Amino acid sequence: MRNIPTLLRRELGAYFASMMGYVVVMFFLIVMGVTFAVVVGYLNRGPTQLTAMKILFQMFWLPSLVVIPMITMRLLAEEKRAGTVEMLMTAPVTEWEVVVAKWLGAFALYGLMWGLTGFYVLILQKFSGGTPLDLGPILAGYFGVLLIGQFLIAIGLLTSSLTKNQVAAALMSFAVIFLLLIVLNWLGFLFQGGVVGEMVRAASAFEHMEDFSRGLVDVRPVVLYGTGTALVLFVTVRAVESRKWR
């Protein structure tokens, strides 16, 4: 794994060597900024048990559906289309190093985008009338969106390894993320009770973010997403290795 820092710098540089990285970051900030403004305006109408940051964290699905496919679609698909993956694999690096570096690069960009929303916390603090914010739920909420995000980024990387077409990779990633987030949440409403309902809620990212946004950090979703990420990255490495036999 000694080559990962070098490969990671290459990945981060690739995002901002073109307009792609800037466009994605600006898109994210515009969408989340508008969402934040709407949420604050709604909360100012009267007393409520909700907070602006809690609602913002519960909107994690929106950037997950759009931004993650955008930042992962090129990771391996573009390398395969341009033929640079062959040169990369002939360098003294392993498939694991390549896959992990690309995953870390995309996660770093995703983390940067969410990190910039920290300005919202400063805005809320300034206009809170001197009342200190409860940082526990805020920190737990950021932990939740990053935990779920790194798993979904691994899925986007896997779909990118399966095709040479970036658009196809983005569409596959969108479809899988939509299934895991939106469809699973719908099933939670459909099966309100029983074993199936409990299983669906236990796997629902919306249920997990509800807990995180309230400041509750449960070890079970941490294990779930950590294990899921390791498994998806393992499958991605095997998909990259399969090129040797074609």
Image: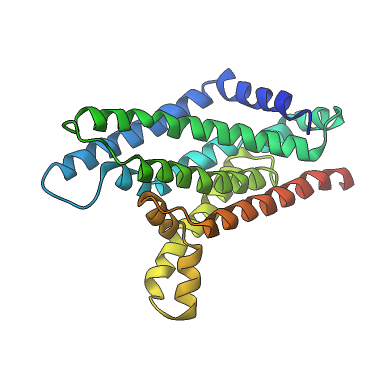
Residue 246: x and y, percent?
86, 46
Furthest residue toward top: 17
Q: Please indicate whether residue 11 sits to the left or right of residue 117 in the image.
A: right
- Above or below residue 65? Residue 85 is above
Relative depth, front residue between 32 and 201: 201
Look at the picture and state if 13 lies above or below 110.
above
Name above or below for residue 187 compared with residue 215: below
Report whether 11 appears left or right of 20: right
- Residue under the point 33% across and 43% down: 56
Instruction: Give me the residue at 82% from left, 36% from top.
Output: 94
86 vs 186, nearest the viewer: 186
Front one among 226 and 158: 226
- Residue 73 is situated, as x and y percent measured from the top left of the image, at 59, 39
- From the viewer's perspective, tell me whether residue 45 is left or right of residue 87: left
Q: Residue at 78% x, 34% y: name it.
A: 1
Which residue reaches farthest left?
Answer: 46
Residue at 50% of width from left, 59% of height from top?
179
The furthest residue to the bottom: 194
Residue closer to the observer: 27 or 8: 8
Q: How is the image coloured?
A: rainbow
> Residue 138's x, y, as percent?
37, 41
Q: Position of residue 188 (x, y in %)?
A: 41, 69
| Total marks in image | 0
